[in-house]
């Protein structure tokens, strides 16, 4: 009986050892395949001869790390959080023009961080548990905020206005934090929260986009979205993009048969323009804007540039990417997103499917004719 038990124990230990050896072999294989066959953008084709996109730098991640869901530009710096499959995550501040890291800060490994900056060189980050303020000059955490034992949903820092940090606690609930890290107020709204303006929350109910005052919840305006949502969740149909530097809000409406971008005046709710983006095979990124253009990325690796005033097409930029299928699948499984940002004539793109963060200088070419 003892011999049988010893034999079974030996077999069990052998299976366990084989399992861990297999896992280690897979990890080594993924790392090796990324070194041998790194992902890359091999060609860029702009269909508007007045613009040229010149690569400034490229940060090609390997399978053991990848950037978070967003990054922010602060003056001449680009700030990101690099997730690590092993060990703690890293907050990195890099030079916008070269992509080289200036300094890094190790942070606790946790779920999705959301980054946002405001004046005076403060960075605000969130994960599912805490919100923190980091002084970028002193390179240290100034304060941390936790709301009892409650858990935040995926997006924690929802918005930052001139007076408050807004935390999304539930689909219809917002907490208002002061810039000293203290809780000012919690408010429940009547409908699901999707966006914000400098003075209001944007909710959606019965296919109507509604602007409500922060605290009184008074309705400022309501606009009916032409695209009806037939999916289980409204978030699968509608996304709202806005920031304090742009008085417009952008609605990405994805219906079953069509897909549109609408730009509204955030003060009045008036429709400024609409653009049918179905022909681009869908939007695969956030919507970014500068003073006169609107940018987004598609599932076909095309950057679309629209005129901000009219919504008309300015340029389509084809990014021809190449990657090995193994690392490409692994990267897209981890990240599954693209993200773009614009600062002056510098375009920053994170290509989720090849796990690469790149910067391009947009040059305007004068036609002598």
Image: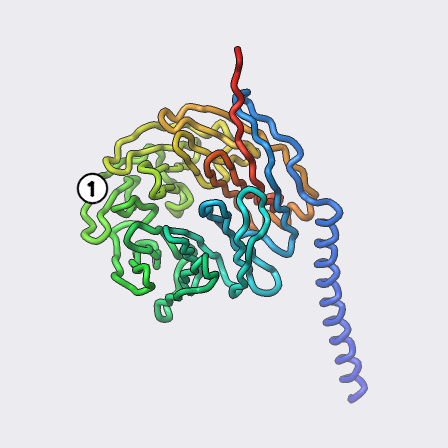
Please state the horizontal and vertical placement of residue 357, each as a whole percent of the image. 58, 44
Residue in the image at 45% along x and 57% along y: 136
Q: Is residue 85 left or right of residue 9?
A: left
Q: Is residue 341 left or right of residue 268?
A: right
Of helix, strand and loop, which one carries label 1?
strand
Please state the horizontal and vertical placement of residue 164, each as a whole percent of the image. 30, 55
Residue at the top extreme, as displayed: 369
Residue at the bottom extreme, as displayed: 2
- Compared to 279, does 188 lie above or below? below
Please state the horizontal and vertical placement of residue 138, each as a whole percent of the image. 46, 61
Residue at the front extreme, as displayed: 137
Q: Is residue 262 left or right of residue 67?
A: left
Q: In terms of depth relative to the viewer, which is nearer, 369 or 125? A: 369
Residue in the image at 39% along x and 32% along y: 291
- How many discs appear? 1
Q: Is residue 336 left or right of residue 140?
A: right
- Residue 37 found in image quarter: top right
Please state the horizontal and vertical placement of residue 250, each as a whole percent of the image. 36, 37
Q: In terms of depth relative to the viewer, which is nearer, 187 or 365? A: 365
Residue in the image at 39% along x and 42% along y: 239
Q: In terms of depth relative to the viewer, which is nearer, 107 or 201? A: 107
- Compared to 202, does 54 lie above or below? above
Query: Which part of the image, by quadrant, shows the N terminus?
Result: bottom right
Name the residue beneath numbered marker 1: 220
Residue in the image at 35% along x and 56% along y: 168
Q: Residues within 10 Å of mark 1 (few under 14, many from 20)?
A: some
- Residue 165 found in image quarter: bottom left
């Amino acid at each position: 009986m003892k011999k049988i038990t010893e034999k079974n124990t030996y077999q069990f230990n052998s299976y366990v050892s084989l399992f861990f050896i297999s896992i280690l072999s897979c990890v080594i294989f993924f790392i090796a395949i990324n070194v041998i066959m790194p992902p890359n953008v091999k060609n860029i084709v702009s269909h508007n001869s007045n613009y040229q996109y010149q690569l400034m730098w490229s940060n090609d991640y390997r399978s053991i790390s990848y950037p978070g869901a967003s990054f922010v530009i602060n003056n001449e710096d680009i700030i990101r959080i690099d997730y690590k499959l092993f060990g703690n995550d890293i907050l990195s501040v890099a030079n916008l023009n070269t992509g080289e890291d200036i300094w890094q800060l190790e942070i606790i490994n946790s779920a999705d961080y959301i980054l946002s900056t405001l004046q005076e060189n403060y960075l605000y980050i969130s994960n599912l548990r805490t919100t923190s303020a980091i002084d970028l000059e002193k390179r240290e955490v100034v304060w941390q905020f936790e709301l009892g034992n409650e858990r935040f949903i995926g997006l924690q820092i929802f918005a930052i206005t001139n007076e408050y940090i807004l935390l999304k606690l539930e689909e219809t609930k917002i907490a208002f934090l002061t810039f000293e890290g203290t809780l000012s107020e919690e408010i429940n709204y009547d409908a699901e929260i999707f966006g914000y303006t400098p003075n209001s929350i944007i909710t959606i109910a019965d296919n109507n986009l509604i602007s409500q005052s922060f605290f009184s919840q008074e309705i400022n305006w309501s606009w009916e979205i032409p695209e009806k949502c037939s999916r289980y969740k409204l978030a699968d149909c509608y996304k709202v993009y806005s920031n304090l530097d742009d008085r417009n809000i952008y609605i990405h409406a994805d219906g079953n048969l069509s897909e549109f971008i609408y730009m509204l005046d955030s003060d009045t709710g008036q429709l400024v323009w609409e653009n049918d983006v179905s022909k681009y095979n869908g939007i695969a990124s956030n919507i970014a804007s500068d003073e006169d253009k609107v940018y987004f990325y598609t599932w076909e690796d095309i950057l679309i540039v629209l005129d901000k005033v009219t919504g008309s097409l300015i340029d389509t930029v084809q990014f021809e990417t190449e990657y090995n299928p193994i690392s490409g699948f692994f990267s897209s499984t981890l990240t599954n997103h693209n993200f773009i940002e614009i600062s002056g004539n510098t375009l920053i793109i994170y290509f989720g499917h090849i796990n690469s963060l790149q910067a391009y200088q947009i040059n305007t070419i004068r036609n002598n004719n």
